[in-house]
Image (cartoon, grey):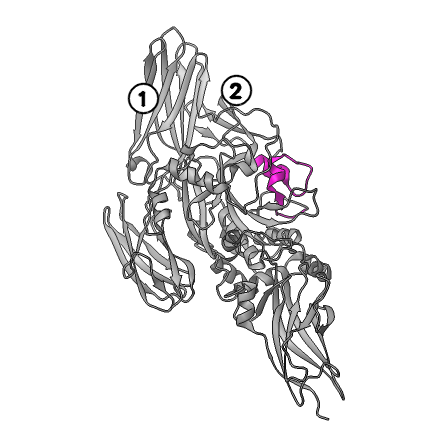
Amino acid sequence: MEDLTLRYVNLELSANQVSHETQGLSSKHLVVRRGKPFKITLLFKGRPFSPAKDCLIFKVLLGDLYVEFPATYAKSQSESQWSAEILPGNSAHSESVTVHVLPPPRSPVGIYDLQLFVLAQPSHRSYRIGEFVLLCNPWCPADSVYVHNEELREECVKNDCGFLYMGTAKNVERRPWEFGQYEEGILEICLNLLQVSPQHKKDWKMDYLCRSDPVYLSRVVCAMINCQDDKGILQGNWTGDFQNGVNPAHWTGSADILKQWAKSNFNPVCYGQCWVFAAVMCTVMRVLGIPCRVITNFNSAHDTNGNLVIEEYYDEMGKKLNKSKDSIWNFHVWVECWMARPDLASGFDGWQVLDPTPQERSGGVYCCGPSPVRGIRERRLDLIYDIPFVYAEVNADVHTVIVRNGQALARTVDTERVGAIICTKSLGSDLPQNVTEAYKNPKATAQHFNFPKVLHKNSNSQAKAYNSSPQDAFRQCNILHSAPGLGSSPERTTRRPRSRRSDYGVHQGLEVSLSLDKAPVAGETISFSVTVANKDNAPKIQREYLNAQAKEYNSSPLETFWEYNNLFHLASYEVKTITHQIHHSQYEEMLLGDGLVNLAVVIEDQNSHERILATEEFNITNPEISIQITNDDDDDDIVVNEEHTARFVFRNPYHVTMNGVLTVKGAGLLKGSVQVNVNLQPGETMEKTITFSPKMAGTKMLHANLVFKNSPIVIRGFRTILVKEA
């Protein structure tokens, strides 16, 4: 009798990729998701396979851990065990046998080795079939990362491009970002991240076993994004000196960072700041199959002593002083991951905060979370992990003090400034989604959002949204907040009363407010008003001190670049509005890349010498690069493997010559990047064209960065493109 030998194994790559939603993740490995069977076809030679005489036993190995299980003609009755089913339709005596292999929904994530033992007469043979990658499965109800909303899965697992939101709460700016999970080698790099982690080095067996739990996985990844404790991906740098690396503002996607880290034998990439840390972590989590989205908290508190109080100091002329260890970042960026929390009491499944920016230690290492968003809202400071720290980031009170010679002259308390707006990218839209209510009681209002007009063509609904008023855009964000599948917000809990947002000062019958006439735009004069109301039946003589300082998003302001003082009279019950302007020539050379300004006014009563302070921190909006597809029709009919042309247009609004490099990228649209040198005189317009041929269907993004050699300012532009199959 001839031996039964295995001639060929078909891993059914195409069918499995479609079935498991893993198309494009790897060209080297079969990539499947736990809790769902994957198909392999075995082709024998010598003689046909006989179920009466022959037995197939599979062995899967993760490192040196393994499990063996037979292939049967019946489905397994247990979801908790590995199983293999010989599909009906295979003849009783066939040379070809198709088998469904089912990984349990609680299987560890990683690269597995698959082996087959063929027990037949007269001999037994063993074969190494090959490797496959097993990921979490948000499509499987039994998986702890399951979400029932397909739109959320598309956005938070499969989407490889998106936006990060920056600026200030009243003038939110969007920055395009390529998560890049489909770029060659990214999946393997993300899996290597787990292998080089301290947890794996310390106890590889326990690490493999714990990889079934997304809570464990998320903490390992969170710590590995920064390099404070390990061979992590990114080195943070907030000094402003980036000579030995890349300015964090110049990164446009995660793939370049991950590839550089792997190529350097896992040495940290220089440099990152909060949005870079968060965006790279989002890529890794999406690759692992854990739904993830990037979150921005505007006016984010770093409460170093845990008393929920942030102190800020100003001198009597309105200059902000660097006297406190606490700080408020204009914006801070972290991620949310979706997962069950069986380690907590019931009700805390869903979105969990994870923050890879190294600020404070958690369990001895620099990571933060996963903190259940509902636990933050309900102030469950007793729950793991790190809820007190995140709670302070969105809820701390701000005590502002005017000082002279170390003595306090006046003090105000603002309970509304911190956590003014918390937002993320909306599902299927370029607009931000307001998720503040998920973290705290609602208090945001429409004027907090101000979006630039659309510079590219999207669907009619998106174009309409971009060209609508900021109030309309904000209302759309609130509508999207309650979209199905996001998880309903918990019931409001009883909390102490909170005052209104304090952008004004009130003292001894005087009220002062400071307001911008419009969102400042680069190259234009900044116009603002100071309004002083006399509440008394007596005239007053007042002196107005004004001070403007450039600042970075995460630190106190630098030196004053503009100041002014003025004496004025107030009649009884008079309300006086004083208008001011800061000419572009007075701020252009002083501003840093974030374009942020701290503006303050101190009103001093000339008789009592009492002082009132009002402040405003704002960002100066840079223009965007317009991207036009020159050979498409009204429906944006871009087709795979067809050549298309894009035109990039930008006018220099600054009053100096700008020299730099234009870099154009687009995952799935361009291979690598295109770079063009640019030299623009004041008022001169740049027009550049490139050609691209899409290689992948779906929603893609073409984006451009113009980095100047003589300025820290970076000009950006993007175009969302729907690519269709040929």
- In the picture provided, is 86 more to the left or to the right than 450? right
The answer to whether 692 is drawn above or below residue 520 in the figure is below
Q: Does the image show residue 86?
A: yes
Disc 1 or 2, which lies upstream in sequence? 2
In the rendering, at what x and y percent does residue 709 appear? 34, 52
The answer to whether 723 is drawn above or below residue 418 in the figure is below
Residue at 37% from the left image edge and 14% from the top image edge? 542
Question: Considering depth in this image, is 544 or 26 the residue closer to the camera?
Answer: 26
The kind of residue on which mark 1 rests is: Ile
From the viewer's perspective, is the residue at label 1 or at label 2 nearer? 1
Residue at 64% from the left image edge and 56% from the top image edge? 143
- In the picture provided, is 86 more to the left or to the right than 500? right
Q: Locate residue 634: give its quadrant.
A: bottom left
- Residue sitting farthest toward the top: 537
Residue placed under numbered mark 2 in the picture: 407
Q: Say which mark, if any, is on residue 26.
A: none
Q: CA distance from mark 1 to mark 2?
A: 29 Å
The kind of residue on which mark 2 rests is: Gln
In the rendering, at what x and y percent does residue 658 appear? 29, 49
The range drawn in magenta is 364-393
* Image label count: 2
Q: Locate residue 515: give its quadrant.
A: top left
Q: Does the image show residue 242?
A: no
> Could you classify mark 1 by the number of other residues whose Cα lies within 10 Å: few (under 14), some (14-19), or many (20 or more)?
few
> Could you classify mark 2 by the number of other residues whose Cα lies within 10 Å: few (under 14), some (14-19), or many (20 or more)?
few
Question: Considering depth in this image, is 24 or 586 the residue closer to the camera?
Answer: 24
Is residue 373 located in the magenta-colored stretch of the structure?
yes
- In the picture provided, is 580 more to the left or to the right than 217? left
Residue at 75% from the left image edge and 87% from the top image edge? 123
The answer to whether 650 is drawn above or below residue 538 in the figure is below
